[in-house]
Image (spheres, helix red, strand yellow):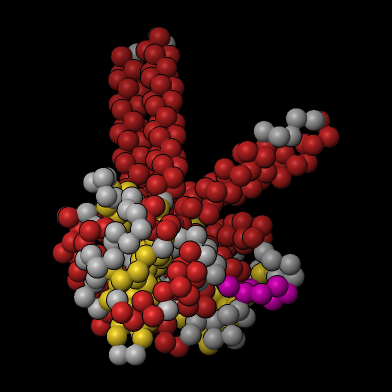
Amino acid sequence: MKVFEKDNAILKMLSEAVSEGLVIIDGNQTIVSTNKAAEDMFGYAGKELLGKHLDILIPKNYHHSHHTYVGEFITDADKRQMGHGNNLFGLRKNGKTFPLEAGLNPFQIKTKVFVMALVVDITKRKEQEQRILDLNSDLEKRIKTRTQELEKTVDKLEFEIIKRTEAENKIKQALKREKELNELKTKFLSMVSHEFKTPLSGILTSTILLSKYHLTEQQEKRDKHIRTISEKVHYLNNILNDFLSIERLDTGKENYNMTTFKLSKVINEVVYNANMLLKSGQNIHFPSEIDDYQITMDEKILELSLSNLVHNAIKYSPEDTPIEIDLEKNKSHITIHVKDYGIGIPLNAQKNIFSRYFRAENALHNQGTGIGLNIVQGHLKNIGGSIHFKSEENKGSIFTLILPINCAL
C-alpha cells in the first residue's frame, strides 16, 4: 500500500474520473485502492476496504474458484474480461449479492505486480433479460391457449372416432414438441446471451420507434422498422435451428429422408434465396446445364450444407466480387465447389475451422456462432459424404462437398 500512498492524490483524481467501480489488489489479493464508484457499489465508505482481502467483495461459495482464477491471471497476466461470459456476483456490505462484470488489467510498479479491476453492476441488464424470458413464457402460454381452442374445435367436428383420435394424437405430439423446443430455447438463451443481445436490442428499438409513427405518410418509416424486426427474428431463428441440429447430431436422433432428385433443383433454390443476401456488385455464377445430374440423399441436408457455404462466401467477401459454384461428376460421387474472393482463413486457424464454436480472428466482426461448418461436417459424415477446403488469407476460399450419388445409411 505504501507504493500507492506516495501518489495518492494523482491516483485518486484518475480513479474518480472513471464511471465504473475500480478496485486494485496486490499479488496477495489484498485491496490497496478503490474509487468512490466501487465503494458505493459494494456499500462501503471511505478507506473501509483498504487492507482487506478481496474475499470481502465475493460471495463465499465463489471464493475457491475465484482464488484459482486470479492466481492464474497474475501468473500469466494480460488484459481480459473476467469469467469470459460466466455469471459473476459481488457481495455488498449488507450481505446482499448482485450480478456484475469485471475487466482485469495487470500492471507493475517497480517489482510489485498489481491487478486493477473495473467493475460494472449489471443488475438492470439481468432484469431486462429476465423480462425477455417472461415475454417468451407469456407467448408460450398464448400458443398453448390457442392450441387448446383448436382442440375444442376439433372435438366439435363430427368426424369418425378414428379420425378424432388421430387428430388428438397429432395435437399432443405438437404440444410435446413445442414444449421441448421452448425448453431448449430457454437453455440456449442462457448459454449464448451475447449472440442475442444485439438483435434483441434492435428489435426493442424498432418496436419503440414504431409506436411513434401514427401518421399515414409515415408508413415508409413503419415498414423500415418492421423489416428490421423481421430480419433480426430470422437471424435468431437460424441460430436456434443450428443448435437444434447440434442436439440431434450429438444424441443420434437425426432421421434422414433419402429421396432421388435433380441436383439443379436444390442449386436453383439455394441461389435464389442467397440473391437476397448479396452485397452491392456481388453475383453468383453456377452451371446451368446440370439437369441430368441426379442424386439420392436427404434433400434438406444438401440444401443446408450448400446454403451454409454460399452464405459464408457472401458474408466474408467484399462488394463487387463473384461467388462461383462448380460441379464435377464421376460414377460414384458428385463434387460441388463453392469459391469466393473474400478475406480467406488465416493459416493458423485452418486446423480448427470445423471445430464447434470456433471463429477465425479475421471473422469476429461478422455475426455468427461458429457452428455452421461443424453441423455440415456432422451431417455429411453420417451419410457417407465429406467436406474440405483450401484458403489463403485476403485471397479467398474454396469449400468442397463430396457427395455419394447414392447415399445409404
Q: Place residue 317 in its image quadrant.
A: bottom right
For the point 64% across and 47% down, the residue is 228
Q: Place residue 272 in its image quadrant.
A: bottom right
For the point 57% across and 45% down, the residue is 203
Q: Is residue 353 left or right of residue 248?
A: right
Question: In this view of the protein, which residue sits in the foreground, 285 or 280?
Answer: 280
Figure label count:
0
Rendered view: 358 above or below 3: above
The reply to whether residue 13 is in sight is: yes
Q: Residue 168: horizontal and vertical position, in percent? A: 32, 22
For the point 66% across and 69% down, the residue is 284
Rendered view: 153 above or below 40: above
**What residue occupies the far right of the structure in this picture?**
217
Rendered view: 320 above or below 229: below
Highlighted magenta segment, given as a residue range: 316-323
Q: Residue 407: horizontal and vertical position, in percent? A: 36, 65
Rendered view: 351 above or below 286: below
**What residue occupies the far bottom of the structure in this picture?**
110
Main secondary structure found in the magenta portion: loop
- The quarter in which the C terminus is drawn is bottom left
Q: Is residue 365 left or right of residue 295?
A: right
Question: In this view of the protein, which residue sits in the foreground, 365 or 306?
Answer: 365
- The quarter in which the N terminus is drawn is bottom left
Q: Residue 83: horizontal and vertical position, in percent? A: 32, 65
The reply to whether residue 136 is in sight is: no
Question: In this view of the protein, which residue sits in the foreground, 259 or 42?
Answer: 42
Q: Residue 351: horizontal and vertical position, in percent? A: 37, 83
Is residue 158 magenta-colored?
no
For the point 34% across and 17% down, the residue is 164
